[in-house]
Amino acid sequence: MQLAPNLHRVGNDLVAAYVVADDSGVTLVDAGLAGQLRDLRRELAAMGRTLADVRGVVLTHGDTDHIGFAERLRREHGVPVFVGEADAARARGEESTKPAWGRVRVGAVARFLWYAARKGGLRTTYLTEVTPVHDGDVLDLPGAPRIVALPGHSPGSVAVHVPAVDAVFVGDALTTRHVLTGEPGPQPAPFTDDPDAARASHARLATVDAAWVLPGHGTPWHRGTREIADVLARFSG
């Protein structure tokens, strides 16, 4: 799905990864679920690209519904995978946390689990090699993505800011569609390790200048970082 020139989404409001392109190739932000590799191939073909054009995968964090096909790209195509240093062990499957679920609606959960199962989300291939990144790093990849630390959902959660496409990719630092309730609109994401740190990260998001705010779950937001940070502030306290 094309969102703007050189900016595409793979997947849907349940689970999404993103494609940034320029003349030097393609950067992927997150790798969704394993079975979404087929969706990626189709999206790249529609752009006149192939997997050979992928120069790197930048993970917003190390959870299983974001690392999906990353190891396959690394192993089979030599694509480097970047992740916040504090989430490197999570991306390798060496550690995890189990935050409380909170409120759920059976229909929303069933839809998410059905989609995840259909797209290979029940079998996780963890990374065997990652390159750690840190706040402020600008990566030598298409679009020159800049890393913005947004801890809270996980210790190493980051946003990926790409000024060339006027977008910031936020992973699960927030959501615009709650996977456990189906509620639409900007809100804190479920399964967050440290809600207080996540609230601080929501405030920091306002300092990033981007029109597109693109979460791992939910509808793309095109009203800017300041407005979405203001909406998220209503959930504080």
Image (spheres, rainbow, N blue to C red):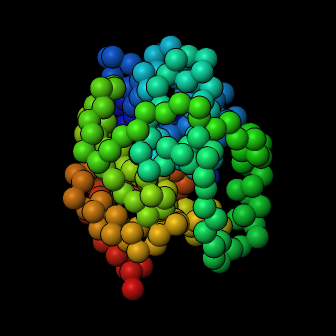
Left or right: 201, with 215 as reference point: left
Q: Residue 114: where, in percent of width, then height?
A: 77, 52
In this rendering, the answer to whether 143 lies above or below 152 is above
For the point 60% across and 21% down, which residue is it?
75
For the point 49% across and 43% down, which residue is it?
88
Q: Residue 211: where, in percent of width, then height?
A: 29, 50
Q: Quadrant of the C terminus?
A: bottom left
Left or right: 113, with 93 as reference point: right
Q: Can residue 224 be seen in this snapshot?
A: yes
Most distant residue in the bottom direction: 237
* 221 or 207, nearer to the observer: 207
In this rendering, the answer to whether 33 lies above or below 129 is below
For the point 52% across and 17% down, which residue is it?
78
Q: Residue 146: where, in percent of width, then height?
A: 28, 40
Q: Can residue 231 be seen in this snapshot?
A: no
Left or right: 171, with 101 as reference point: left
Q: Residue 24: where, in percent of width, then height?
A: 33, 16
Residue 224 location, quadrant:
bottom left
For the point 64% across and 65% down, which residue is it?
98
Residue 51 location, quadrant:
top right
